[in-house]
């Protein structure tokens, strides 16, 4: 058994609305909480009409208010888009509202395109300062030091746990040097997975937050009652990736019978490369695929992306994943 978590993008389905998507994300969090998942994170993306998690800290508050024990966090905040001081205030507020349940994972990418980056009023070179910004943010969340004139309220002393996210060896080395847990975005950018995890383990230095390395890896899992049903459900995510290649960012589409009628051979190859860390199928196939992925990565935790159009089938997918993993269900809270 491995610890399981959830990555949530608040996907807007065709025929639905952003408000429904946000409420479905909150309902899913309550569902996976009962199933024994460790945490649910939302990701900062901008200028995607089918994604509702751009105002990440606001979405976290909405979801956390609908749960009681599940850890809720950002996976991640794209720190170059923000002043560390503002993020300390936001997540210090969240930790004050939901004590002991907030995570803050940090990414170096902008989470959008260059045109939108200009709309955010951020300099593309801001990412060059990412390591220093992480340290600055960490200092704002620590107890106030003598003589410290700029303090984050709420925030100071909350010690919101920080994570480093990445899809390259840069993030792995930074997380190891700072002694922070590391999350790898293998659910859409798996090329450097093995080398990044190896470097993280080899170079890890214990810190006040973390004594031993802790690795979280992203995995797409489409679980259903049968292999055929899972393959059909997976076409919604496959069409989304295909549309990104085409420069069209639309809403999540209903599954189709023949994905090869939708994409070209080149688009299929591109999607296949980005989605190579994917398991789809009935319970037996999901059990084997999850076990093989954990054996390959030595992951302490797997963050599941189950991008399914129908909310009921999506909830069922998370049930199957937890069941085949042997995750113990949580007892209801009084």
Image (cartoon, rainbow, N blue to C red):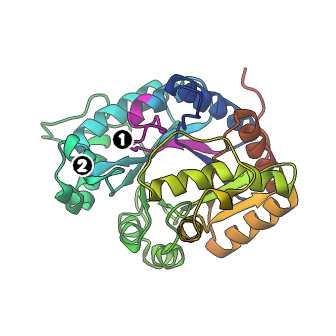
* Residue where numbered disc 2 is placed: 115
Assign the C terminus to one quadrant of the image: top right
**What's the residue at 76%, 56% (across, down)?**
231
Residue drawn at x 87%, y 61% as measured from the top left: 284
Q: Mark 1 points at which residue?
A: 47
Q: Main secondary structure of the magenta part?
A: loop
* Quarter of the view holding residue 294: bottom right
Residue stretch in magenta: 38-58
Q: Horizontal and vertical percent for residue 314? A: 71, 40
The label shown at residue 193 is none
Label 1, residues with CA under 10 Å away: few <14, some 14-19, many ≥20: some
**Local secondary structure at mark 2:** helix
Are discs 1 and 2 less than 8 Å apart at CB? Answer: yes
- Give coordinates of residue 274: x percent, y percent: 54, 66
Quarter of the N terminus within the rendering: bottom right
Looking at the image, is 175 positioned above or below residue 151? below
The image shows residue 177, relative to residue 53, as above or below, that is: below
Q: Which of 164 and 136 is in front in this view?
A: 164
């Amino acid at each position: 058994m491995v610890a399981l978590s959830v990555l949530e993008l608040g996907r807007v389905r065709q025929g639905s609305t952003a408000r429904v998507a946000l409420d479905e994300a909150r309902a899913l969090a309550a569902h996976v909480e009962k199933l024994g998942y460790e945490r649910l994170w939302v990701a900062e993306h901008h200028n995607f009409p089918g994604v509702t998690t751009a105002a990440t800290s606001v979405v976290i508050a909405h979801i956390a208010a609908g749960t009681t024990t599940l850890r809720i966090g950002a996976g991640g905040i794209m720190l170059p888009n923000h002043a560390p001081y503002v993020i300390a205030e936001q997540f210090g507020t969240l930790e004050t509202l939901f004590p002991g349940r907030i995570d803050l994972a940090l990414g170096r990418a902008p989470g959008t395109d260059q045109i939108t980056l200009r709309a955010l009023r951020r300099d593309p070179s801001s990412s060059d300062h990412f390591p220093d910004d992480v340290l600055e943010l960490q200092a704002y969340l620590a107890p106030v030091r003598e003589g410290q004139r700029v303090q984050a309220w709420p925030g100071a002393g909350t010690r919101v746990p920080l994570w480093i996210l990445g899809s390259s060896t840069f993030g792995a080395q930074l997380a190891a040097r700072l002694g922070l847990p590391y999350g790898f975005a293998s659910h859409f950018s798996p090329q450097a997975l093995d080398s990044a995890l190896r470097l993280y383990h080899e170079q890890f230095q214990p810190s006040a937050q973390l004594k031993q390395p802790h690795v979280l890896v992203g995995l797409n899992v489409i679980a259903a009652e049968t292999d055929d049903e899972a393959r059909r459900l997976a076409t919604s995510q496959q069409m989304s990736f295909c549309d990104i290649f085409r420069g069209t960012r639309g809403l999540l589409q209903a599954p189709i019978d023949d994905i090869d009628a939708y994409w070209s051979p080149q688009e299929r190859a591109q999607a296949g490369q980005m989605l190579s860390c994917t398991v789809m199928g009935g319970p037996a196939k999901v059990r084997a695929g999850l076990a093989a992925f954990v054996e390959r990565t030595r992951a302490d935790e797997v963050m599941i992306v189950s991008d399914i159009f129908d909310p009921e089938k999506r909830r069922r997918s998370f049930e199957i994943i937890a069941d085949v993993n042997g995750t113990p269900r949580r007892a209801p809270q009084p």
